[in-house]
Image (cartoon, grey):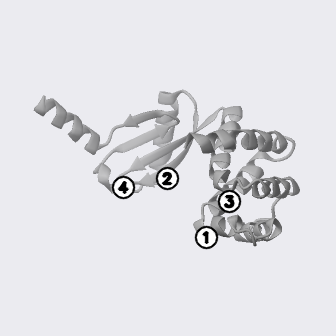
């Protein structure tokens, strides 16, 4: 969805500039919560209804997050709702986090594993991955039993796949070639 990314970019940049004046981490949590709420199809259908008032949509979203939104975040959300851009909110959140991570010298890493990873093991894996990718990583573990064993790591557009499934696929290609 390149279109949503294009729509989201100016919103994310503006939000990040305002967040720099206060607490970027808190604003990141708030935009993530709002993006999660905005993914609900029923809410977007209600927001698109001509009978729905922007203040009603704002109140529902604020209540659904369970957070006390900063005044600036409420103003931002009002603009997003008024311009009919709720569908772009998840992309705004992703770009906001990318801007914050770039400024902090950190990258998000998604570690796909066939089995749960213990915290001590995760710390070792993250340390090794930080050396491999030459940057500080914020890791998130996602279980994916289809990998059979090993891990697959995604950092931005880079992928490191050491899973058993990947190795079996490479063997299959080598044997059938």
**Residue 17 coordinates in the image, percent (x, y):** 81, 39
Which residue in the structure is indicated by mark 2? Answer: 119
For residue 168, which quarter of the picture? top left
Instruction: Evaluate if marks 3 and 4 touch, with contact meaning CB atoms under 8 Å apart.
Output: no
Q: Earlier in the sequence, mark 2 or mark 1?
A: 1
**Residue 143 coordinates in the image, percent (x, y):** 41, 55
Which dot, 3 or 2, sits closer to the camera? 3
Distance in Å between CA atoms under marks 2 and 4: 13 Å
Q: How crowded is mark 1: few (under 14 residues within 10 Å), some or many (20 or more)?
A: few
Which residue in the structure is indicated by mark 1? Answer: 42
Left or right side of 97 for 131: left
Q: Earlier in the sequence, mark 3 or mark 4?
A: 3
The answer to whether residue 117 is seen in the rendering is no
Left or right side of 123 for 43: right
Q: Residues within 10 Å of mark 4 (few under 14, many from 20)?
A: some
Left or right side of 79 for 161: left
Q: Residue 115 carries which label?
A: 4
Residue drawn at 77 percent across, 41 percent down: 16
């Amino acid at each position: 969805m390149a279109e949503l990314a294009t729509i989201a970019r100016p919103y994310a940049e503006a939000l990040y500039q305002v967040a720099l004046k206060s607490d970027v981490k808190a604003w990141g949590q708030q935009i993530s919560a709002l993006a999660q709420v905005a993914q609900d199809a029923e809410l977007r259908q209600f927001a698109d209804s001509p009978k729905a008032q922007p203040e009603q949509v704002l109140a529902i979203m604020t209540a659904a997050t369970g957070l006390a939104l900063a005044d600036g975040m409420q103003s931002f959300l009002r603009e997003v709702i008024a311009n009919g851009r709720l569908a772009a909110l998840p992309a705004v959140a992703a770009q906001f986090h990318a801007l914050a991570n770039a400024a902090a010298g950190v990258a998000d890493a998604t570690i796909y594993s066939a089995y749960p990873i213990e915290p001590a093991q995760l710390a070792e894996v993250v340390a090794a991955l930080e050396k491999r990718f030459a940057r500080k990583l914020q890791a998130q573990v996602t279980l994916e039993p289809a990998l059979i064993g090993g891990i697959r790591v995604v950092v931005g557009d880079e992928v490191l796949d050491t899973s058993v499934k990947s190795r079996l696929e490479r063997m299959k290609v080598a044997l059938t070639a």
